[in-house]
Amino acid sequence: MRGPAKGIWYHAYVVLDIFSRYVVGWRVELIEDGQLAADLVQDIVADTGGHPPGYLHADGGAAMTSKALASMLVDMDITRSHSRPHTSNDNPFSEAQFKTMKYTSDYPDRFASVNEARTWMEGFTAYYNHEHRHSGIGYHTPASVHYGTAGAVRDQRQATLNRAYGAHPERFARRPAAPPLPAKAAINDPAKRAKAPIH
């Protein structure tokens, strides 16, 4: 996030649940630092009832590969995952979230201060979690998938499509179906790695 002058940058730390695309935690800081990343993950685990995830996929940045974060993950029994082989875009889920962020109509060319960047990020995260309909999760909001309401929403959509089809079937080439709900999401899928042959 560009600051008020050339060479000044603010660093956005964002943690996503890759299944729902829900932003479970974020912070904007003046520096990229492993302890700040570790503190963010600890805060998220505490805020979600003290249940750490089994895996954390991180990019290759200094904060994400730091000893502070690595030690904390070991202590919490969270397996670290990093870049996928032969893939320049090592986390398509977070890359998509950052692209949505940067192409939002009110994303400023520069932020006047770190507090302005934090205020903007707070508003964007609320929009992204609760209003943005994501094609990768059947055009549901991340919050709907994360909190388990997407099934009921899909049923309502299907009922509406069924009524439209029943009233005017001639308008449709085939019976319409609401987009399916996501079934699985993985990066460096542990199940596939376990089955991979050893050379």
Image: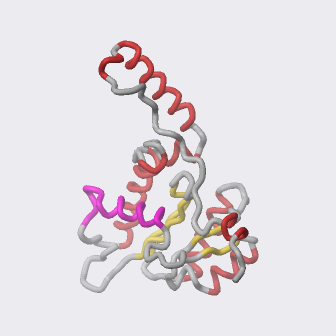
What x and y, as percent, mark residue 30?
42, 79
Residue 11, picture quadrant: bottom left
What x and y, as percent, mark residue 102?
32, 64
Tally of numbered discs: 0
Question: What span is colored magenta in the figure?
Answer: 92-108
What x and y, as percent, mark residue 48?
66, 55
At 50% from the left and 65% from the top, the residue drawn is: 26
**Magenta span contains residue 106:** yes
Q: Is residue 92 above or below residue 10?
A: above
Residue 121, picture quadrant: bottom left
Q: How is the image coloured?
A: secondary structure
Residue 186, picture quadrant: bottom right
Judged by its main secondary structure, the magenta piece is helix
| 143 horizontally vs 122: left or right | right
* Quadrant that contains the N terminus: bottom left
Q: Is residue 91 above or below residue 182?
A: below
What x and y, as percent, mark residue 82?
58, 77
- Seen from the viewer's position, the closer of residues 56 and 52 is 56
At 72% from the left and 80% from the top, the residue drawn is: 198
- Seen from the viewer's position, the closer of residues 138 and 121 is 138
At 59% from the left and 85% from the top, the residue drawn is: 66
| 51 horizontally vs 9: left or right | right
